[in-house]
């Protein structure tokens, strides 16, 4: 079904944990350009949902993200499903306000919904209408609310929109500050104190990346941590392996400074389980507001 983008190994993957819509989080750019027919909708998706990578990674390469268009209103808004999860579990429903020859326009932090659909098979080899069939119930349950808050069938108001150049891969600002391993361990360890684990690691950091950058240079980071043998201080090699996964989102200024009370959001914190999770756009919006995140709105 899916067309392969590359057979090269994903050499700059930070982790392979499923996060949001994808298992690959990149510091700068997607190495697998989108070759599908909905480039403008793809652009909307990768800049709307913070932790998308922009491709469907399968361990040895990647496929194009999958897009299915449900409907358009009288002013050109488009409601569509999006998936880049090769594990076939995480799906998004998104509204794009408009697009022209160069740019896409959408309402930030309110134009998408995510869902987890339990599955035991990969995306590869599924039928051509798989995304449509897989997300039909999700679409029917959420379309009216999503339409209402995105002004469906009302004249386009670009003053409420952010805009991004149409692209075939996710591009983040160059020379953006990236947290060091030392900084990540400090943040992880501060959170770990609240868990009272019997056997926490001193250096749980396993990866980190940059998800988004605001109009003033503030940065949304993701940090991955794991505490191996977290519940067994006296473990032996013959003991059952246990682990505790942590995923934190952190907002810093352009120099890496952050508010210890408001600047850290716990996205996942659980032992002995695959770190697959979804989140609500409203919660991310509130997190950003608490940290004075600034969107670059359109002027007209």
Image: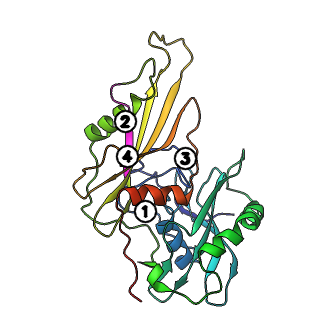
* Mark 1, secondary structure of its residue: loop
Residue at 42% x, 29% y: name it. Answer: 194
Give me the disc on residue 208: 4
Q: Distance between the residues labelled 1 and 2?
A: 26 Å
Foreground label between 4 and 2: 2
Residue at 48% x, 10% y: name it. Answer: 236
Foreground label between 3 and 2: 2
Q: In this view, does 253 lie above or below 45?
A: above
- The residues colored magenta run 202-209
Q: Distance between the residues labelled 3 and 1?
A: 16 Å
Question: Mark 4 and 2 residues: CB-CB less than 8 Å, in contact?
Answer: no
**Direction left: furthest residue:** 255
Foreground label between 4 and 1: 4
> From this viewpoint, is residue 220 visible?
yes
Q: How far apart are marks 3 and 4 (CA)?
A: 14 Å
Reading the image, the residue beneath label 3 is 18
- Could you classify mark 4 by the number of other residues whose Cα lies within 10 Å: few (under 14), some (14-19), or many (20 or more)? many
Q: Distance between the residues labelled 4 and 1?
A: 15 Å
Magenta span includes 106:
no
Reading the image, the residue beneath label 2 is 188
Reading the image, the residue beneath label 1 is 30
């Amino acid at each position: 079904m899916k067309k392969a983008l590359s057979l090269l190994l994903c050499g700059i993957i930070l982790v392979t944990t499923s996060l949001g819509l994808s298992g690959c989080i990149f510091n700068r750019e997607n190495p697998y350009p989108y070759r599908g027919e909905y480039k403008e909708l793809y652009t909307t998706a990768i800049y709307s949902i913070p932790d998308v990578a922009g491709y469907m990674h399968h361990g040895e390469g990647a496929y194009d993200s999958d897009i299915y268009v449900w409907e358009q209103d009288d002013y050109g808004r488009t409601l569509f499903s999006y998936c880049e999860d090769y594990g076939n579990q995480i799906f998004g429903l998104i509204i794009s306000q408009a697009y022209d020859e160069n740019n896409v326009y959408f309402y930030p932090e309110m134009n998408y919904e995510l869902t987890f659909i339990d599955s035991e098979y990969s995306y590869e080899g599924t039928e051509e209408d798989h995304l449509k069939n897989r997300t039909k119930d999700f679409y029917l349950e959420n379309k009216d609310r999503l339409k209402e808050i995105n002004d469906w069938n009302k004249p386009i108001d670009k003053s409420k929109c952010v805009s991004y150049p149409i692209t075939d891969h996710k591009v983040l600002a160059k020379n953006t500050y990236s947290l060091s391993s030392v900084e990540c361990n400090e943040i992880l360890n501060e959170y770990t104190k609240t868990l009272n684990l019997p056997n926490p690691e001193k250096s749980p950091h396993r990866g980190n990346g940059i998800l988004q950058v605001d109009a003033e240079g503030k940065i949304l980071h993701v940090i991955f941590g794991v505490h191996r043998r977290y519940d067994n201080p006296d473990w032996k090699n013959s003991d059952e392996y246990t682990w505790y996964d942590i995923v934190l989102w952190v907002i810093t200024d352009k120099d890496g400074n952050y508010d210890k009370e408001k600047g850290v959001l716990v996205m996942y914190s659980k032992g002995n389980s695959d770190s697959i999770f979804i989140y609500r756009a409203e919660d991310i919006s509130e997190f950003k507001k608490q940290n004075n995140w600034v969107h670059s709105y359109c002027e007209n």
